[in-house]
């Protein structure tokens, strides 16, 4: 399950996931961001994965990094904060964070929504 909504007041695209999240759904997240022309060109994204089990292999991280990389040129800047608490999911997100270091792109892990929002709004 993926629910996407844009909060005009906060200026944040909120993505909430639940259940099992496949590689296809994660790649679809980047397709949505890449194709949507209505989002601000300085996009802040909050991804809430606290009730999610990632059904991806560690080798899939490369595909996710490439999807993020191909999305960046559509924006002046892209910032993503992921709220995640489960051990395996944290490992996958950490691997992504270590490999997705691009100009105009920032990704960071958090264990609370408030901390993630503070970081997103600090820019």
Image (cartoon, rainbow, N blue to C red):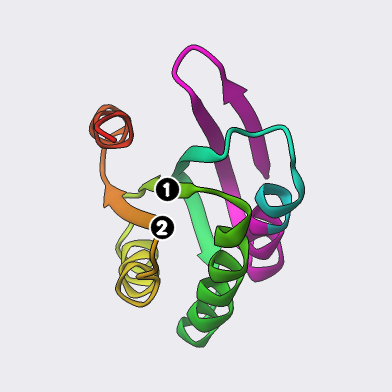
Image-based side of 29 in relation to 65, left or right: right
Q: Residues within 10 Å of mark 1 (few under 14, many from 20)?
A: many
Q: What segment carries the magenta color?
A: 1-30
Residue 106: quadrant of the picture: bottom left
Residue 103 on the magenta segment = no
Q: Quadrant of the N terminus?
A: top right
Residue beneath disc 1: 80
Q: Quadrant of the C terminus?
A: top left
Q: Residue furthest bottom?
A: 59
Residue 35 on image: x %, y %: 76, 50
Count all numbered tags in the image, as a single digit: 2
Residue shown at the point (41%, 57%) measured from the top left: 105
Marks 1 & 2, CB-CB < 8 Å contact: yes
- Say whether disc 1 or disc 2 marks the residue closer to the N-terminus: 1
Residue 67 on image: x %, y %: 61, 69
Residue beneath disc 2: 105
Residue 56 on image: x %, y %: 55, 74
């Amino acid at each position: 399950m993926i629910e996407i909504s844009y909060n005009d007041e906060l200026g944040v695209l909120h993505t909430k996931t639940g259940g099992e999240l496949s590689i296809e759904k994660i790649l679809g997240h980047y397709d949505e961001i890449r194709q949507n022309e209505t989002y601000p060109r300085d996009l802040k994204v909050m991804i809430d994965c606290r009730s999610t089990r990632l059904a991806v292999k560690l080798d899939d991280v490369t595909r996710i990094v490439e999807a993020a990389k191909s999305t960046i040129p559509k924006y002046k800047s892209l910032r993503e904060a992921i709220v995640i608490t489960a051990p395996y999911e944290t490992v996958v997100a950490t691997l992504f964070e270590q490999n997705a270091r691009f100009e105009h792109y920032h990704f960071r892990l958090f264990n609370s929504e408030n901390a993630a929002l503070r970081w997103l709004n600090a820019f």
